[in-house]
Image (cartoon, grey):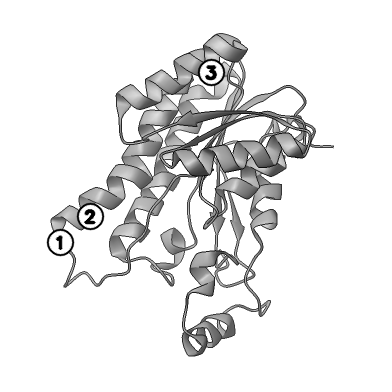
């Protein structure tokens, strides 16, 4: 189940080993997808591509600035020249900043939204024409538990707002493109065991874990598995939804 054989999947933010993007890329490749590893960090892109190919998968590396319309369009052009189709888009690229509203600068708000929301919009817009032409597409956007519970651990109000915007954007888009054979869904991770989490001081880490009923951070593989499901044929009748993956730290 959940096989993605020969599907072409773009994963943004998949060059960094600090977050979940690399695991998403590796998981989709393991399920048979041809993965386009897209990130601003070219060295990281090459590392992810190498990890996929060494495991027997197929991958193409692309240097991508999600905040640039030209960069997104150039990526799509390269993918279409190489493979002729785009089946899956995982909008994973994102940034955060821990700062209070009182100390926040307008430039901080703009920077966070430029990547987390406007970059997601530009990348999505760039692939829509091809997906509509194919009458097939899977778009999975990475939001956050912070979008739903009003804050988290690492980000400020601007981060929460940007990730909440992702949820609203995704639901609206899902309605727009449903008749084109395209589904649009989100995953909303809670605390995940990444390098960022491991950088927390021990006492703060204990406080955070105390607020999670399961008593542990999630694993990047647990996020990637949900994304692989949403990208699969088995999820063909699911659109406009989000999957909360947070160990019970927030329940709707």
Which secondary structure lies at badge 1? loop
Q: Residue at x 61, y 20 (%)?
A: 181
Answer with left or right where residue 129 lies relative to residue 245: left
**Is the residue marked by circle 3 packed among few (<14), some (14-19), or many (20+) residues within 10 Å?**
many
Disc 3 from disc 2: Cα separation = 32 Å
- Judged from the image, the secondary structure of the residue bearing numbered disc 3 is helix
Q: Is residue 91 above or below residue 132?
A: below
Q: Judge whether 210 appears above or below 242 on screen.
A: below
| Residue 109 - label | 2
Visible residue check, residue 91: no
Figure quadrant of residue 209: bottom right
Q: CA distance from mark 3 to mark 1?
A: 37 Å
Q: Position of residue 152 (x, y in %)?
A: 43, 70
Mark toward the start of the polypeptide (3 vs 1) = 3
Q: Quadrant of residue 244?
A: bottom right
Taking depth in this image into account, of 32 and 136 the one nearest to the observer is 32
Q: Are marks 3 and 2 in contact (CB under 8 Å)?
A: no
Q: Picture coordinates of residue 72 (x, y %)?
A: 39, 26
In the rendering, at what x and y percent does residue 84 appear? 59, 10
Return the disc, 3 or 2, that comes first in the chain's sequence: 3
Residue on which disc 3 sits:
79
User: Residue 223 location, x and y as percent?
Assistant: 64, 53
Q: Is residue 217 left or right of residue 163?
A: right
Give the spatial CA distance, label 1 vs label 2.
7 Å
Are the residues tagged 1 and 2 within 8 Å (C-beta)?
yes
Residue nearest the viewer, comparing 176 with 7:
7
Q: Are marks 3 and 1 in contact (CB under 8 Å)?
A: no
Say how many tags the image has.
3
Find residue 105 and name its label: 1
């Amino acid at each position: 189940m959940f096989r993605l054989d020969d599907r072409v999947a773009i994963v943004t933010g998949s060059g960094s080993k600090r977050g979940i993007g690399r695991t998403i890329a590796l998981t989709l490749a393991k399920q048979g997808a041809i993965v386009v590893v897209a990130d601003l960090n070219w060295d990281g892109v090459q590392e992810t591509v190498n990890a996929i190919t060494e495991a027997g998968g197929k991958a193409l590396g692309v240097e991508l600035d999600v905040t640039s319309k030209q960069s997104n369009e150039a990526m799509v052009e390269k993918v279409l020249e190489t493979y002729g189709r785009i089946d899956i888009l995982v909008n994973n690229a994102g940034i955060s900043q821990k700062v209070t509203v009182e100390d926040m600068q307008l430039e901080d708000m703009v920077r966070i939204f430029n990547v987390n929301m406007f970059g997601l919009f530009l990348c999505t817009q760039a692939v829509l024409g091809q997906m509509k032409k194919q009458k097939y597409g899977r778009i999975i956007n990475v939001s956050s538990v912070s979008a739903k519970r009003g804050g988290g651990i690492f980000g400020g109000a601007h981060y929460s707002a940007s990730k909440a915007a992702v949820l609203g954007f995704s639901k609206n888009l899902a309605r727009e493109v449903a008749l084109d054979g395209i589904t649009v869904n989100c995953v909303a991770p809670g605390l995940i065991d990444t390098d960022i989490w491991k950088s927390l001081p021990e006492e703060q880490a204990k406080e955070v874990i105390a607020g999670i009923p399961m008593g542990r951070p999630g694993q990047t593989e647990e996020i990637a598995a949900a994304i692989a499901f949403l990208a699969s044929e088995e999820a063909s009748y699911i659109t406009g939804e989000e999957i909360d993956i947070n160990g019970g730290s927030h329940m709707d």
